[in-house]
Each structure stands twice: as structure tokens, then as C-alpha cells.
Amino acid sequence: MLKDTSLNGKRVLITAGASGIGLVTARGFIEAGARVFICDVNAEALKLAQAALPGLQGCVADVADEAQVQAMFTKLDAALGGLDVLINNAGIAGPTALIGDLKREDILRTIEVNVVGQFLCAKHAVGHLRQGRGPCIL
């Protein structure tokens, strides 16, 4: 089978990239020739992902925490030297219970990850993407 190398040299960041959709996406980008950096809140999953995909780089980061997002971009720059594609994949399902049983902090955590996290990653990616080649946010 011919290998698709249409993404040769592209520098890709995938949030929540250590498992599930993020890990499958990382594998696809690597197979297409991209250099991939992932973040995840689960340090053990990150180690396993890096062991499974040679060349995969990454760090532990909570996308809802701006200081951690800034640190992630510093690490990404050191590892890849820039960014061409952001895959804003991080998200959580949130609590499942009757509305009367839900706690405010559980709902706030869902909003922080699913909304604020998306915003923070896009906010900090834009400057890097403007300097990239064919910038894209997914």
C-alpha cells in the first residue's frame, strides 16, 4: 500500500491526544508525514501513546488551565519549532444525573474544559499558526 505523505513536515498539535479519537488522529497524521505533538491530562496514557507511536511528542496539560496551556505551547515550540495545525480535540462528557442531583462544580468543570479549553488553545495557537505553513484549526 502506498503511504500518503501529503502532510510531510506539517507540525500538528492534538489536544487530548493520548487515547480515543485523539490517538487515532495522531496516528493518521504521523502516517501522512506530519510531526505530531499531543497533550493530555493523563500522564500514564501519554506515556503509552508515545510508546505506541514512535516520534510522537507531547506533555501533560489541562486545557482549562491557561498557565498549563502556555507551558504546553512553550514545549511544543521547543519540540516542533512552530505550529501548522491545531486539532482542538479535548472535551469531557460531564456529569450524568438528575438535574436536582448535579453539583455546580461538576457543571463548571465541563464548561471549563469544553468551552474555555477550546478558547484558550485557539487563543494561544493563533500567533504560532500565523507563522506556520497553511494554518488550520480543527
Image: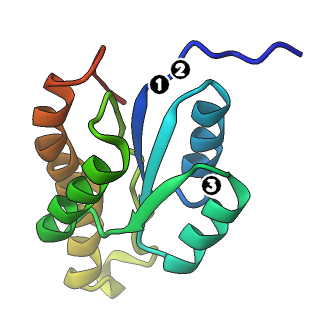
Q: Position of residue 123 (x, y in %)?
A: 11, 43
Quarter of the picture containing the N terminus is top right
**Which residue sits at x=66%, y=69%?**
48
Q: Nearer the viewer, residue 19 or 47?
A: 47
**Which residue sits at x=57%, y=79%?**
44
| Residue that carries the numbered disc 1 in the rendered image | 9
Q: Seen in the image, is 40 located left or right of residue 86?
A: right
Question: In the image, what residue type sits under mark 1?
Answer: Gly
Distance between mark 2 and mark 3 Cα atoms: 24 Å
| Residue that carries the numbered disc 2 in the rendered image | 8
| Residue that carries the numbered disc 3 in the rendered image | 20
Q: Residue furthest right?
A: 1
* Image marks 1 and 3: residues in contact by CB distance under 8 Å: no
Q: Position of residue 15 (x, y in %)?
A: 39, 52
* Image marks 2 and 3: residues in contact by CB distance under 8 Å: no
Does label 2 or label 3 sit earlier along the sequence? 2
Up-down relation of residue 60 to residue 132 (above or below): below
Up-down relation of residue 84 to residue 114 (above or below): above
* Image marks 2 and 1: residues in contact by CB distance under 8 Å: yes
Q: Residues within 10 Å of mark 3 (few under 14, many from 20)?
A: few
**Which residue sits at x=68%, y=64%?**
51
Quarter occupied by residue 111? bottom left
Q: Seen in the image, is 68 located left or right of residue 98?
A: left
Distance between mark 1 and mark 3 Cα atoms: 24 Å
Q: Position of residue 12 (x, y in %)?
A: 41, 36
Q: Nearer the viewer, residue 3 or 80?
A: 80
Secondary structure at numbered mark 1: loop
Which label sits on residue 120? none
